[in-house]
Structures are given as C-alpha cells and as structure tokens.
Image: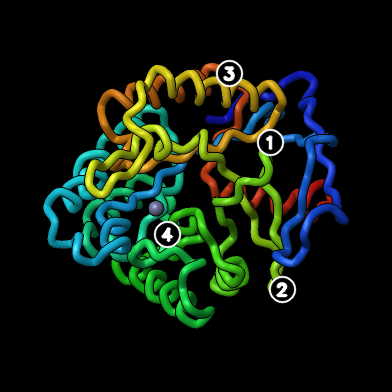
C-alpha cells in the first residue's frame, strides 16, 4: 500500500482556505483546490474505502415493529452474516486495513464478527447505538448518553475505543462534532461539501472531517426494499463501475482524495464485490496512491493543519 516516491514529489493540486466564506456557525471552513497538497511518499491521491455495518439496526430504528418481521431482519442481517465476511476476505487479498463503522447494538449482537474485524487489523468506528439519526435526538444530553453507551460496548466487548465516527443516516446534529471531540475522537466522515479532508473547529479543538459523496456510496444504486419501498431500483454494477472508476480517475488526475463507502448488506453480494475488487485493482494499479488506515490519514491531516499548510 506504500507507493514509491515520485521524482517531482508534489502533485498539481491547489488548496486555499476561504476564511470569510460561507456560514461559520457550525465551525466549518470551506476550501477550494488552489494550493498544493503533498501526500506522504509523494503520492498523487489519498484513498479511503470504509464500510458501515448497519445490519438490522436501521429497520428497527425506522419502526420497532419491524424487529418481528423476518423480511426486514433477514435483509439487514445479510450484512453481518454474509456480506462482511466476503468483504473481509477481499480486503485481506489486497492487504487493505480500513475502518468499519458499527452501531453499538450490532457489536452486542455479533460480537464474534466484530472481534474478527479487529483481529484482522481494521479500525472499528462509532455509528450510533441503534442507528439513531443525531439530528433527530431531542437533546445534547440524549446524544451524549448514546455515545457513551456505545463507547462502553466497544470497550467491554472488543477492548477498543473508536477514534472515528460516521453519523447514522449522514445526519449529525449541531452538538455532534463537539461531543465527538470531547470523547476523544479524531475524525468524522459524513460532510458533502468538499473533495478534500478538512478540520472542523470545535470549542475543544479540531476534528478531522473526511467528506463523502452520494455518488461514491453504494446505497443510492443498490439499496432496495419493496415494502416499505426504499431505494432507486437495482442498478447494473457495470453502470456503477463507470461512475466509481471515473470518480476515482478524476480525483487521481487532480491529485485529491477518493473517499468511497459501502454497506455490507448492500455491496456484499458476489456480483457487486467483483466490481469493487476491480475498483481496488484499478486504484492499486496506479502505484502512486496512498491508502493508509483512516486514523493515519486523519493524523496526517491534523499534523498538516498544525503546520499551517491546511486546516
Ligand atoms: Zn448506517
């Protein structure tokens, strides 16, 4: 995963932080690509490919009565039971270590799988307790209570403390970033506003944000349920390959950051994982990409921020 240094080192990417641009209330900063980003080892593009192991939790969160419906529980459990083991094997084949974001309830329900994820060298990230959407919680106290509850489960069952977080349903609250910083998190990954990572200024210090995009997410293309109706139909993986591979090629060309995310119950099917494997091969075929664990990418960005080269 470590690319060879290139002769010129720098990549033709430009980043400029516009301090007086955009709303500041949420502590967000905005950037455009106007000054160079130099990734480690002279890499041209940094890569992040993570998974949200939701399992049955979004269905129960949507309607507790669905916990008694075999249809919904079996759709959700395809992720932990079948998709995730297949994904772990594909990641192992390429020696990729990443972060799997997991609701605390799923850690309790599937402890052996979660232990296996840790054993294989991956990070585990926070993703709510039962996939609660932070923006819909009634108070900061309720959100903190759920966060502390989940952290306790990770510690008790897996012996680890997550350093990364992804808000369920990509919908953090106005309290989320400060609470994450308070409880020792280093990064969060949900925002949709930039291509590059950036730092969110919280009253307790910076939290790295790894922005995502709906087009680099499997759910809009493959998530499907007939009752209740969910999703946009089932897409051909060949059409999605065109979107994902071109998104990567574009980011690589500009010298940026490619951040892809999947859900094991959605992307874990054999046909889709064959396509994801082709994507991995396409990325690794470039040689000068940097594909670290997300926590290492976050620490790199924090260091860069402290040095004044980025925020
Ligand atoms: Zn989720």
Quadrant of the rendered structure where residue 176 is? bottom right
Q: Left or right of 73: which side holds 118?
A: right
Q: CA distance from mark 3 to mark 1?
A: 15 Å
Q: Left or right of 188: which side holds 18?
A: right
Which numbered disc, 1 or 4, marks the residue that appears first in the sequence? 1
Judge depth for marks 2 and 1 and give the one in front. Answer: 2
Callout 1: SS: helix
Judge depth for marks 1 and 4 and give the one in front. Answer: 4
Q: Left or right of 31: which side holds 137?
A: left
Front residue of this view, candidates 127 and 87: 127
Q: Which residue is mark 4?
A: 127
Front residue of this view, candidates 238 and 185: 238
Q: Are marks 4 and 3 in contact (CB under 8 Å)?
A: no
Q: Which residue is mark 3?
A: 286
Residue found 44% across the figure and 63% down from its top = 133
Callout 2: SS: loop
Q: CA distance from mark 2 to mark 4?
A: 22 Å
Q: CA distance from mark 4 to mark 3?
A: 32 Å
Residue that protrudes farthest toward the right in the picture: 20
Determine if residue 94 is in view.
yes
Which numbered disc, 4 or 3, marks the residue that appears first in the sequence? 4
Determine if residue 284 is in view.
no
Q: Residues within 10 Å of mark 2 (few under 14, many from 20)?
A: few
Q: Residues within 10 Å of mark 4 (few under 14, many from 20)?
A: many
Which numbered disc, 2 or 3, marks the residue that appears first in the sequence? 2
Q: CA distance from mark 2 to mark 3?
A: 40 Å
Q: Which residue is mark 2?
A: 203
Judge depth for marks 2 and 3 and give the one in front. Answer: 2
């Amino acid at each position: 995963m470590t690319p060879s240094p290139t002769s010129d080192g720098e990549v033709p990417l430009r980043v400029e932080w516009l301090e007086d641009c955009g709303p500041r209330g949420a502590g967000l900063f905005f950037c455009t690509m106007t000054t160079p980003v130099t990734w480690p080892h002279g890499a041209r593009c940094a890569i992040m490919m993570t998974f949200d192991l939701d399992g049955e939790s979004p269905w129960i969160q949507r309607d507790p009565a669905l916990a008694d419906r075999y249809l919904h529980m079996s759709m959700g459990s395809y992720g932990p039971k079948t998709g995730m083991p297949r994904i772990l094997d594909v990641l192992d084949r390429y020696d990729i270590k990443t972060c799997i974001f997991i609701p605390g309830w799923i850690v309790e329900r599937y402890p052996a799988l979660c232990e296996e994820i840790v054993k294989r060298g991956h990070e585990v990230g926070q993703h709510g307790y039962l996939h609660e959407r932070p923006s819909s919680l009634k108070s900061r106290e309720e959100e903190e209570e759920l966060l502390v509850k989940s952290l306790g489960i990770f510690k008790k069952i897996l012996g680890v403390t997550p350093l990364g977080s992804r808000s369920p349903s990509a919908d953090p609250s106005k309290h989320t970033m400060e609470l994450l910083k308070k409880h020792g998190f280093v990064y969060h990954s949900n925002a949709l506003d930039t291509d590059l990572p950036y730092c969110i200024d919280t009253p307790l210090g910076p939290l790295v944000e790894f922005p995502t995009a709906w087009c680099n997410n499997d759910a809009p293309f493959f998530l499907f349920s007939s009752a209740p109706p969910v999703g946009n139909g089932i897409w051909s993986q060949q059409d999605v390959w065109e979107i994902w591979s071109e998104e990567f090629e574009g980011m690589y060309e500009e010298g940026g950051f490619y951040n892809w995310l999947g859900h094991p119950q959605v992307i874990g099917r054999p046909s889709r994982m064959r396509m994801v494997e082709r994507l991995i091969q396409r990325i690794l075929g470039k040689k000068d990409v940097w594909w670290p664990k997300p926590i290492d990418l976050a620490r790199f960005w924090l260091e860069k921020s402290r040095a004044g080269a980025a925020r």
